[in-house]
């Protein structure tokens, strides 16, 4: 999600910047519904953002740069790999039993202080 958001924001605010997005997954927006991925992909195509999927990032490989149509490499790279919320280190008494994704959300108060259930 973050890569799509970042690429579209760069394109919107800096329209002269050529932007390319790659992902190892077969399409953008991973687990979101197909309609969301199709919408985003259509938008990115319409504004000139190049997309490459089923593509592993390998900056040291000339073949990689050829595949994403940047034979002279990129001027600047922004890499967002494996972003995931993690709460495995929190004690169970501060995590919800229910909620999106089956629970495990951190309880907190209005001051953003972690609280017990």
Image: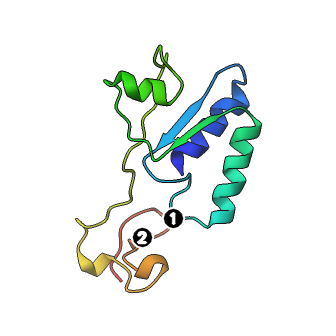
Furthest residue toward bottom: 97
Residue located at (67% from left, 60% from top):
36
- Local secondary structure at mark 2: loop
Looking at the image, tell me whether mark 1 or mark 2 is earlier in sequence order: 1
68 left or right, relative to 38: left
Query: What residue is shown with label 2?
Result: 108
Residue located at (38% from left, 44% from top):
81
Q: How is the image coloured?
A: rainbow
The quarter of the picture where the C terminus appears is: bottom left
What is the total number of numbered labels drawn onto the structure image? 2
- In the drawing, what numbered circle is on residue 66? none
Residue located at (38% from left, 59% from top):
85
Q: CA distance from mark 1 to mark 2?
A: 27 Å
Residue located at (68% from left, 31% from top):
11
Residue 83: tell me if it is visible: yes
- In the drawing, what numbered circle is on residue 31? 1
Q: Nearer the viewer, residue 29 or 107?
A: 29
User: x, y percentage for residue 84?
Assistant: 38, 56
30 left or right, relative to 83: right
């Amino acid at each position: 999600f973050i890569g799509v958001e970042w690429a579209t924001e760069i394109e919107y605010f800096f329209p002269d910047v050529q932007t390319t997005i790659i992902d190892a997954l077969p399409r953008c927006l991973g687990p979101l519904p197909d309609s969301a991925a199709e919408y985003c992909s259509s938008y990115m195509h319409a504004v000139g953002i190049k997309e490459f999927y089923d593509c592993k990032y390998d900056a040291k490989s000339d073949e990689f740069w050829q595949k994403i149509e940047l034979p002279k490499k990129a001027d600047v790279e922004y890499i967002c790999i494996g972003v995931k919320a993690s709460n495995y280190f929190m004690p169970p008494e501060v995590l919800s039993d229910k909620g999106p994704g089956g629970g495990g959300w951190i309880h907190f108060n209005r001051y953003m202080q972690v609280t017990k259930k």
